[in-house]
Each structure stands twice: as structure tokens, then as C-alpha cells.
Amino acid sequence: MTEDWTKAETEVLARSLMSAPSVHNLQPWLLDVGPDELLVRERTELRLPHHDPLGRDRAASCGAAVANLEIAVRTLGRAADVEFLPDPARPDVVARIAATAASPPTGAELHRYGAIARRASHRAPFEDAPVPAAALRRIGETGAAPGVEARLVSPGREVAQVARVLRFAAEQYRSDGGYQRELSLWTIRDERSHRYGVGLPASRVPAGSVPWAGLVRSATELPEPADVEARLATESLFVFVTADDTRLDHLRAGYAMERAWLTAVDVGLSAAVLTQPLHLEPARSALCVDLTLSGFPQVLMRVGYSTDIDLAGPRRAVEEVVRRS
């Protein structure tokens, strides 16, 4: 199977990749479209020195985009053979997806593809309603990609430990002038006219955002640790853990996280991810010890029920992202 993608198919591929979550909505990816393969490239010139100094989140964002692209290829009826970091001579190419054979998608894949358009970050509290164990198990299984464990944080002691870590990180970032300037720089204030592009809409990152929702601002009034713990106790929390801490691990973590997120949306849940605390070494180390993790925590993901409609952020134009090989 070597025929080129049609214009409509290319649009499906591009829209799916562009709908992936990314740190501060940077959308740090480009897509090269060839007749039988797709290349995802990382835009390493897009930097967040105060939030993501080592580029871990940027790589994870690209991994999430690969997960969406893989599902889009499958939905279009082709096999999708994903290879991360396929060419050492081209380090900007983070993944190659070979799509040479006809192969009908499974029902689960079609469901995950349908969830792409509905996926958005939920920064508010969730409803006080437990998520069924079967749904959590399905999310964890989908997020168990090669080299990645999607581990559910246990109620009680482990939730209390995570709450303390989130409170500590919030205190650090609230008083970090460089981080606050960077957050302000990437916040969109002219939302009505800013239909395309990058950045975080101000209305979706309110000044009162609390530690469990991330993106703490200088005006945030931090609740007591017991209150953070009580809020987290009404939610379900996953931590994505990798055996090592290389760029490949960061890509795989983002890939696994997005697969799990799409599954959560498919079963009627909302979700949001937290990575900021994991850039503070004391916080990251504390999680490793307190949760007895088998490797490196890369992403925290909150999961629960919501009656709110979460809107996706703005996106770049397709022509900014796609290039035909």
C-alpha cells in the first residue's frame, strides 16, 4: 500500500496530532506526511526555561501527539507501527509511524479516536463521586505502554503524601518570579481575537487556581494541606512512572498518558495532568520515596466526574504544522 494520503485523510491526521495536550499549550511538534510513513518532529526552539528547564514536558507533549496520530492512522484503516527516536542522525525526529498495510481499526480504537475531540484539561474540582474500579483498571491498562507504568495512587496515606508534595510545590512556584513571568507571558488575554496559535486562555487558568489544579499564580490563596488532601480524596490519581529518565522515557510517558486520558474520556470521565511539582527535585524525590515507586515519576493525572464542559485551547493552523515529504 503506497498510495498517498488524500487531502481529507491528511486533515484527519493533522487535526488529531494538533489536538494533543502540550505543556503551556506550546504545541511543540511538526508533521511530515509521506505516502507510507509519518514523521513527528519536536520543535526544540520552543522553550520554557522556568517551567520545563530540561525539556521533559515538551518531549512528553510530543509523545502525546504520537498517541493521537497513531489512533488516527488506525481509524483511517492502516496499520500503525510506531518507532520512537528512529534516526540518531536526526534527533528532532521523535517518532516514525509506518503505515503501509491495510488493517481495519478495532472498536476500542474507534472509541479512543472519538475521544480526541472531547479531551480537554479540567482544572476545577471534580464531583464527589467515586470512579468505578473497572473504569480505573481500564485506564491503567491502556496507560501501561512499553516502559511505562500507570500506577494508581492509593487512598489514605499515599493521597496525603501527594497532597503535601503539591502544597510544597505550590509554595515554591507562587514565590518564583521567573516562573510567574513565564506563566504570564504564555497566558492569552485577548481570547476573542486569539482563535489560532499557542498559549493558555486566561479564563481557563483563574488566579485562584489551587495546587491540585496546577499553574499556581502569585495571587493564589493556598489552602491548608488537609484541605488539599480532602479534595484529592474525592478524585482518582494516577502517576506515570518510567524505569529511566531519558528522552525516550519522556516520550513514552506522554504517549502512555494520552492513551489513558482518551480512555478516561471514552468512559465518561474528565481528567487533567500535573507536571510542575515533578520539576522540583525535592518534590520528585519525596514522591519516589513516599509512594515506593519503581522508577521516575513523569506525570500525575487527576481523574473524576465533571458536569462542566471543558473547552480545548487554541491551535495552530494546519499549514503551520504539516509538511508533505
Image (cartoon, helix red, strand yellow):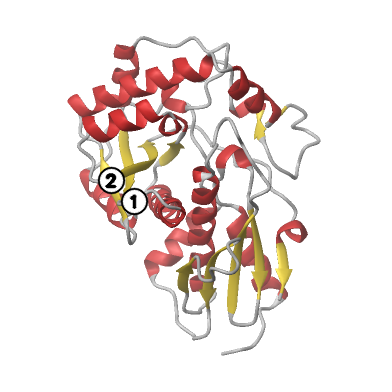
The kind of residue tagged 2 is Gly
- Outermost residue toward the front in this view: 89
Tell me: residue 111, above or below residue 169. Answer: below
The residue drawn where x is 65% and y is 64% is 31
The residue drawn where x is 49% and y is 29% is 123
How many numbered badges does the structure rendering display? Answer: 2
The answer, for residue 156, to whether it is visible in the render is no
Q: Position of residue 131 (x, y in %)?
A: 28, 39
Label 2 environment density (alpha carbons within 10 Å; few <14, some 14–19, many ≥20): some
Q: Which of the 4 quarters of the picture holds residue 191?
A: top right
Q: Position of residue 253 (x, y in %)?
A: 40, 51
The answer, for residue 20, to whether it is visible in the render is yes
The kind of residue tagged 1 is Asp
**Residue at which label 1 appears:** 244
Tell me: residue 165, above or below residue 134. Answer: above
Task: Determine whether label 2 and label 1 are within 8 Å by CB.
Answer: yes
Mark 1: which secondary structure?
loop
**Residue at which label 2 appears:** 295
Specify the quadrant that holds the N terminus.
Answer: bottom right
Q: Position of residue 278 (x, y in %)?
A: 41, 33
Tell me: residue 211, above or below residue 257. Answer: above
Whether residue 57 sits left or right of residue 318 in the image: it is left
Specify the quadrant that holds the C terminus.
Answer: bottom right
Mark 2: which secondary structure?
loop
